[in-house]
Image (cartoon, grey):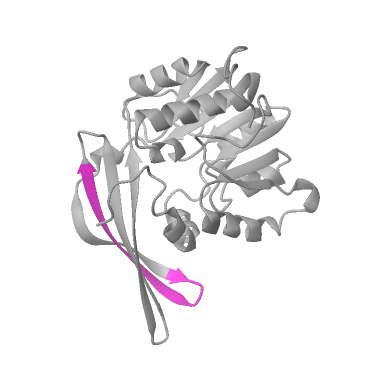
């Protein structure tokens, strides 16, 4: 088993399988929501943890002036390949970096988004607070911060080596065998992944773990507020429906105050 880390571990190894798995799980069901959010903003938009560009490219094609940031070089390389299919005038900027220390100047963006559980890869209070402070710093006054959380992770029952997905990825047959562990004291859910690919007589196994931290909504909102944001709305689905604790999606929309992020040096 991979030891617990700051949550960045595993994503490089996950890169070849990320699009294949997500096509069978979230698919495109959040794209229209973020398109609507981006369309209401003027100025540049920053996506934290853009990965392979699953969301970044559709937003760029819709006219948003996108910048995507990710810590994983293999993820970003796949995003660069995908970006070649976007018209040059709409092509997003891709940056490798850490969301806890953003490589952008103060007040550079009118919208920052952290989609699909991205902030749950931060496995400590200090890391979450740093990322929230950085989002506040790079947002213009009254700029919007949008956060999408996956609420059900702590409710996953622990299991060991279950076949979760099967299918084809190009010419290769792919099988995902997964184990789930819970560290309830720390609020962590750990997915131990084993991907097996078969193409002809060649078989390869890929092992990695992904760690996520889930906080109660009340705690999450308090930390967002302390970072200098005003909570504008909390939704329970991608249509803008009202939030409830049992909702499938937890969406938080916040705005930066005039003083948010001030006093920190430019990056």
- Residue nearest the observer in this picture, 233 or 131: 131
Indicate whether 161 appears above or below 219: below
Residue 236 can be seen in this image: no
Which residue occupies 30% across, 51% down?
Answer: 191
List the single residue furthest toward the top.
258
Whether residue 215 appears in magenta in the rendering, the answer is: no
Q: Position of residue 232 (x, y in %)?
A: 52, 17
Q: Position of residue 134 (x, y in %)?
A: 54, 28
Which residue occupies 28% across, 39% down?
Answer: 188
Indicate whether 167 appears above or below 246: below
Which residue occupies 60% across, 12% down?
Answer: 259
Residue 34 can be seen in this image: yes
Q: Position of residue 97 (x, y in %)?
A: 56, 44
Q: Which residues are magenta?
A: 168-182
Whether residue 172 appears in magenta in the rendering, the answer is: yes
Instruction: Say which quarter of the image contains residue 84.
Output: bottom right
Left/right of residue 139 with respect to residue 74 in the rendered view:
right
> Which quadrant holds the N terminus?
bottom left
- Residue nearest the observer in this picture, 205 or 173: 205
Q: Position of residue 122 (x, y in %)?
A: 40, 37
Indicate whether 207 appears above or below 34: below
> Which quadrant holds the C terminus?
top right
Left/right of residue 114 with respect to residue 188 in the rendered view:
right
């Amino acid at each position: 088993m991979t030891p617990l880390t700051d949550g960045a571990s595993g994503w490089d190894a996950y890169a070849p399988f990320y699009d294949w798995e997500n096509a069978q799980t979230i698919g495109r069901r959040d794209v229209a929501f973020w398109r609507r959010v981006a369309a209401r903003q003027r100025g540049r938009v920053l996506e934290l943890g853009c990965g392979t560009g699953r969301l970044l490219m559709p937003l760029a094609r819709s006219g948003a002036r996108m910048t995507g940031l990710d810590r994983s070089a293999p993820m970003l390389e796949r995003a660069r390949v995908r970006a070649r299919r976007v018209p040059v005038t709409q092509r997003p900027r891709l940056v490798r970096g850490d969301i806890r220390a953003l490589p952008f100047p103060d007040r550079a963006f009118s919208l920052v988004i952290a989609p699909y559980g991205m902030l749950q890869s931060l496995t400590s209070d200090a890391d979450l607070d740093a990322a929230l402070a950085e989002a506040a710093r790079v947002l213009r006054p009254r700029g919007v911060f949008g956060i999408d959380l996956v609420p059900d992770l702590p409710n996953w029952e622990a299991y060991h080596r279950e076949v979760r997905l099967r299918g084809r990825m190009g010419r290769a047959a792919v099988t995902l065998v997964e184990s789930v562990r819970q560290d309830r004291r720390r609020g962590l859910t750990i997915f131990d992944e084993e991907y097996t690919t078969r193409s002809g007589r060649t078989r390869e196994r890929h092992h990695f773990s992904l760690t996520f931290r889930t906080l109660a909504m009340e705690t999450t909102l308090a930390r967002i507020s302390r970072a200098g944001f005003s909570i504008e709305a909390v939704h329970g689905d991608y249509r803008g429906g009202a939030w409830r604790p049992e909702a499938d999606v937890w969406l938080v929309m916040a705005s930066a105050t005039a003083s948010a992020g001030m006093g920190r040096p430019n990056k």
